């Protein structure tokens, strides 16, 4: 009996280490997060706050436009205020089996420049997000494993460990809390290549709008800099029939005012 108990214990440990015993595998969960329906297109008006270690805030206002192109998203972001960033815009274009194309338009330059792979670890317009963070990460770039279950902001979540394949990320690991109902990511811990926790993303509020679960209030915290970027959704609209023309470098360069 003692020997059998040890065998059962070791089997249980092995099953947990492999993510076995849950209703879904890690890879399936990551795919559900990626495939989650969030509208054929979407518009968000966002209030962004940059908060330093002393609690001092700088506020920005921006618009985000997203459109689905046969399962691949294009995202256009335009800053409305304050004056020092007004007119700055960003375009991200997803591609099959390739990294996203990203472009940043700066009014002082008068043209868009492409963000190359070596720049994707840089901070996005002085926020706590990097250009890599601005991508909708494809599930096959990581090895995924469910390592537990835990409640967060009153919602039941899977804890998903994602280990990037070589050369695909600035991080060595991400642990995400995935809502079992909506498949929204409600929290993520980011680890550097030495295995140290360096950033934390979390959601404070979600709402169901037009049948789509939506993040309404979220924060990215850079633990090394003791700096935070908070984003609060002030307005959201889904399935408005956004023009395809909007999601191009040409449009971005011509409509920044």
Image (cartoon, rainbow, N blue to C red):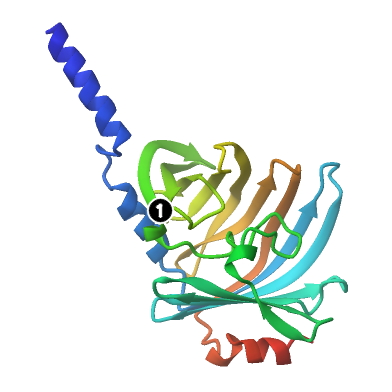
Residue 26, image x and y in percent? Answer: 33, 48
Taking 27 as reference, is 195 above or below it? above
The residue carrying pointer 1 sits among few (fewer than 14), some (14 to 19) or many (20 or more) residues within 10 Å by Cα, namely: many
Residue 163, image x and y in percent? Answer: 43, 47
> Please, what secondary structure does the residue beneath circle 1 have?
strand
Residue 162, image x and y in percent? Answer: 43, 47
Please tell me in which quadrant of the rendered image residue 92 appears.
Answer: bottom right
Which quadrant is home to the N terminus?
top left
Taking 152 as reference, is 5 above or below it? above
Foreground of the two, 51 or 44: 51
**Residue at position x 60%, y 88% in the image:** 246
Which quadrant is home to the C terminus?
bottom right
**Can you identify the residue that label 1 sits on?**
142
**Residue at position x 58%, y 43% in the image:** 192
Taking 197 as reference, is 88 above or below it? below
| Image side of residue 55 versus residue 9, left or right | right
| Image side of residue 12 versus residue 154, left or right | left
Residue 170, image x and y in percent? Answer: 56, 52
Please tell me in which quadrant of the rendered image residue 194 appears.
Answer: top right
Foreground of the two, 182 or 129: 129
Figure label count? 1
**Residue at position x 56%, y 45% in the image:** 190
């Amino acid at each position: 009996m003692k020997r059998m108990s040890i065998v059962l214990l070791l089997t249980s440990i092995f099953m947990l280490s492999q993510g076995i015993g849950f209703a879904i595998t890690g890879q399936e969960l990551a795919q559900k997060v990626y495939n989650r329906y969030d509208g054929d297109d979407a518009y968000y008006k966002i209030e962004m706050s940059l908060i330093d270690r002393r609690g001092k805030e700088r506020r920005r206002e921006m618009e985000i436009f997203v459109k689905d192109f046969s399962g691949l998203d294009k995202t256009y972001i335009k800053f409305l205020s304050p004056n020092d960033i007004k007119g700055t815009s960003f375009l991200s274009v997803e591609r099959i089996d390739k990294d996203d194309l990203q472009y940043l338009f700066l009014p002082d330059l008068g043209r868009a420049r492409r963000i190359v792979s070596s720049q994707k670890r840089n901070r996005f317009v002085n926020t706590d997000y990097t250009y890599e963070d601005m991508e909708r990460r494809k599930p096959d770039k990581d090895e995924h494993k469910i390592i537990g279950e835990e409640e967060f902001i009153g919602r039941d979540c899977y804890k998903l460990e994602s280990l990037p394949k070589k050369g695909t990320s600035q991080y060595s690991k991400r642990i995400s809390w995935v809502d079992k109902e909506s498949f929204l990511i409600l929290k993520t811990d980011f680890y550097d290549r030495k295995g140290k926790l360096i950033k934390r993303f979390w959601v404070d509020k979600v709402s169901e709008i037009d049948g789509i679960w939506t993040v309404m209030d979220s924060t990215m915290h850079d633990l090394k800099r003791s700096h935070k970027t908070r984003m609060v959704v002030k307005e959201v609209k889904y399935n408005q029939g956004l023009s395809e023309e909007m999601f191009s470098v040409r449009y971005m360069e011509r409509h920044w005012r």
